[in-house]
Structures are given as C-alpha cells and as structure tokens.
Image (cartoon, grey):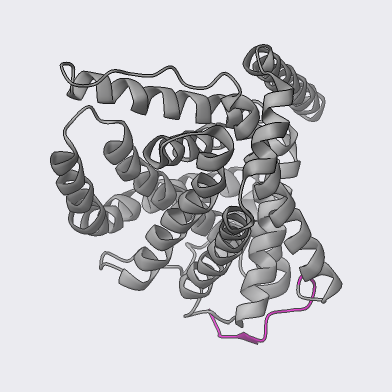
Amino acid sequence: MNTVASKVRAHVGWAASLLLGLVLLIWLLKAVDWSLVWERSQSVSASAWCVGVCGLMLSHVLRAGRIRNEWSQRLDMRWHEAWGLLVTHSAWVVLVPMRAGEAVYVWALHKRGHVSLLEATLSLVKMRLQDMGILLCFAVFFWLPLVLAWRSLLTVFMLFVVLPWVFPWVWKMAYQRLAGKVLKQDASHAQPQNTRSQVNPPKLVAPVQVNWTSWFYAVSNWAVKLLAIAWPLSELGGLDMRYALAGALGGEWGAAMPLQPPAGFGPYEAGAWAGATWAHHSDSLTHPLDFAPLPLPLHLPAAFLVVHLMALAVTIISALAARLLGWTEQPFSGIHPA
C-alpha cells in the first residue's frame, strides 16, 4: 500500500512540475518579439559565448575539486574521476523532474567508492547547504536595497567571516540530527534480533574547523558560474552587467526549488526574471532621487531561455564525454579504510 501511495505521489509531483514549468514559460514568453531575439542573438560577440561556455566548464572543474576535497580522507579520487562524477550527477539533476537526479551522486559513491548510503547522503546535504549559504551571500550583494559600499562590506563579511566559521557548527548539529534520524529508521525496520548488533553510527565525523579549501572551491564555483551565465546574457538581453548577474543568481535560486520540471524549464526563467527585476527595483529604492528606472526589455525572458539552453548543453555534452571516455563506471582509484 505504501509503495502504491509513493508511486502515486511521485507521478502527481512530476505532473505538477511539468504543468508549473509550462505555465511559467507561457506567461513569461507571451509578449516576446522573437524577431528581436533573433536579431539580438546575431549581435552577441563570439567572445561572450566563449566566456559563457569556458566559464561553465571551469565551474565543473571547481566543483569536481570540492568533491575531491570532500572525500580526500576516504578516496584517492583523481581529477578526471571527480569530474566524471560531477558532470554525470549534474546532468541527471537537470534532466530528471523533481531533482530526483540528486540520487546519482549518492549511488555513484556507494557503488564506486564503497561509501555507505548514509555517508554519501550526508555529504550531498552538506554541500547543498553550503551552496545555499553562498547563494544567500550573493543575494545580499545583488538584491539588498543598500548602497554599493554597504552591500559589498556585508557580503564579504558574510562570505569570509560569518559563514566559514558558523557553517561547521551548524553542520555538526544538522549531521547529528540527520544521522540519528536515519539510524533510528533503519533500526525500526530491522529484525529485532539483528538491530543491536548491526546498526552502528557511521564513522564519518562532522568537523568543527573551517575547511578553507572546500570554501574556496565553493565560492569560486558560484562566482565563475554566475559570470559565465551573465556575460552572454548581458549582450543578448541588452542588460547592464549588474542586472545580468542578478538575473543569473535568480535563475539558480529558481533551479534550486524542489518542484522542478525536466531541465528546469520555467522555474529557471522565472527566477532569473525575478532576480533581474528585483535588482532593478532595489536600485530605485536606494537612489530614489537620481535613479530613473528604465523598463526591462520585453524579450528578456527569451534571453534567459537561451542562456539556460547553453548551460544545459555544456552539462549534457560534458556528461556524454565522461561516459564515452569511461570515467563514470570504474571504481575510484584508491579507497582508504573507513
């Protein structure tokens, strides 16, 4: 009965995500002049597209570095292995509805690195929480209605003082709760005679010191990725770079929402539109006397769609390349005892 109910909920969720994406796209693109989009796309410089594609590829490398650092005490994971894991995981996340592709990271570590499912799941949760913290800092910079100097100081303080020192303690508390909850669930499903002898806490330790290497990879990844999206977006959409960056950030927040259609079509574009619009509005609040807000271009949602397609293409082609090169199936090079 529980299995049937779970399947029904999954199908309802997928259908709702598809409907949400379709409605958002129709609403955003209804006033777009596609001839103007075509004209603008031809005026985008080759260097802008090159920055976009190369920046997204560099973002993959930085995220692969974070995965290597995350498991450096357990796995001798080579760069190409970490990159193959990262791009495969990213491709499944964007292609499968409801972000169900997140499970690929967990399963790959379990299958190829002999990491327990609980440890791999906790690692994924930790990195996602770290991502949310960093995106929140960037949101302060782009969306808070303060003058540039105050926004800059507050963002730097949060990125390099508050979050690096607070996050390990927050993660330690979250780890204890999550691990304890999962272990109790495992124990409740186990046979009574096997429960005490087989259910033991995992040996993964939640550190309380700052991992500056991981923090460098995480912050650098998001800075590079936002710039890679914003650079061609600014030319294609006719936007100031500040608003293009704010739109790229909004797109990432939209893509992070759990109710995701395949490839994130709809929520990404809506998030990008909201991000650029709010940054535009916050400028009018910060400088009410000397700021004359110009309306954002009507073809802007189509520009968001185009750069979204660019990012998807880079991710999927990278995942296919990793698959063809055989970097996604073999066990990791070295495994240390847990």
Please identify the residue farthest to the right as the structure is shown: 324
Residue 88 or residue 210, whichever sits in front: 88
Q: Is residue 50 above or below residue 284?
A: below
Q: Main secondary structure of the magenta part?
A: loop
Camera sees residue 190: no
Residue 122 or residue 152, whichever sits in front: 152
Left or right: where 264 falls relative to 323: left
Q: Is residue 55 above or below residue 265?
A: below
Query: Residue drawn 57% across and 64% down?
Result: 197
**Res 23 quadrant in image:** top right
Left or right: where 201 falls relative to 281: right
Residue 209 or residue 202, whichever sits in front: 209
Query: Residue drawn 27% across and 37% down?
Result: 140
**Res 278 quadrant in image:** top left
Left or right: where 147 falls relative to 29: left
**Res 120 quadrant in image:** bottom right
* Residue 75 is a magenta residue: no
Left or right: where 274 falls relative to 83: left
Residue 260 x, y percent position in the rendering = 65, 31
* Residue 333 is a magenta residue: yes
Q: Is residue 117 above or below residue 230?
A: below
Start-end of magenta stretch: 328-338
Question: Which of the image's four quarters has the N terminus?
Answer: top right
Query: Residue drawn 86% across and 71% down?
Result: 324
Query: Residue drawn 54% across and 41% down?
Result: 235
Camera sees residue 40: yes
Residue 302 x, y percent position in the rendering = 65, 28
Residue 204 x, y percent position in the rendering = 45, 68
